[in-house]
């Protein structure tokens, strides 16, 4: 039985298969969609409130997913 591929090796394979430009485009689309969610859900009263909403959404998306994976041991087989 083959050992599972680590995430670092998975990223390396994805870069070799699709190229860095494609992966950066995917990340860009994900950030843009997060931005749209923030903007469309509620119009802020001030610019600083808008910036806080945007930063919170992006950081929550990145860190929240990593936290869930670590917390529930989804990276372990």
Image (cartoon, grey):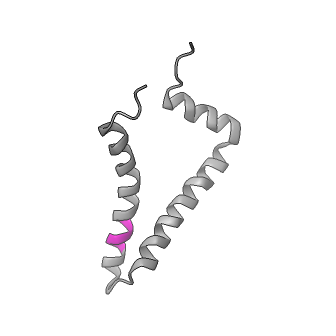
Can residue 76 be found in the magenta stretch? no
Q: Nearer the viewer, residue 74 or 53?
A: 74
* The N terminus, quarter of image: top right
Q: Going 57% across and 15% down the picture, which residue do you hit?
A: 2
Up the image or down, 12 lies above or below 3; here it is below
x and y percentages locating residue 8 in the rendered image: 50, 30
Q: Going 32% across and 85% down the picture, which residue do you hit?
A: 46
Extreme-bottom residue of the structure: 45
Q: For residue 57, which quarter of the picture?
A: bottom left
Can residue 52 be found in the magenta stretch? yes
Q: Going 35% across and 81% down the picture, which residue do you hit?
A: 47
Extreme-top residue of the structure: 1
Give the side of residue 24 with respect to residue 37, left or right: right
Q: Nearer the viewer, residue 67 or 31?
A: 67
x and y percentages locating residue 4 in the rendered image: 52, 22
Up the image or down, 48 lies above or below 59; here it is below
Give the side of residue 48 with respect to residue 35, left or right: left
Q: For residue 69, which quarter of the picture?
A: top left
x and y percentages locating residue 38 in the rendered image: 42, 72
Magenta extent? 51-55
């Amino acid at each position: 039985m083959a050992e599972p591929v680590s995430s670092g090796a998975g990223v390396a394979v994805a870069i070799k298969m699709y190229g860095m430009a494609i992966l950066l485009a995917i990340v860009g689309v994900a950030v843009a969609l997060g931005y749209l969610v923030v903007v469309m859900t509620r119009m802020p009263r001030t610019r600083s409130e808008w910036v806080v909403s945007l930063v919170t959404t992006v950081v929550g998306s990145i860190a929240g997913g990593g936290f869930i994976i670590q917390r529930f041991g989804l990276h372990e087989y």
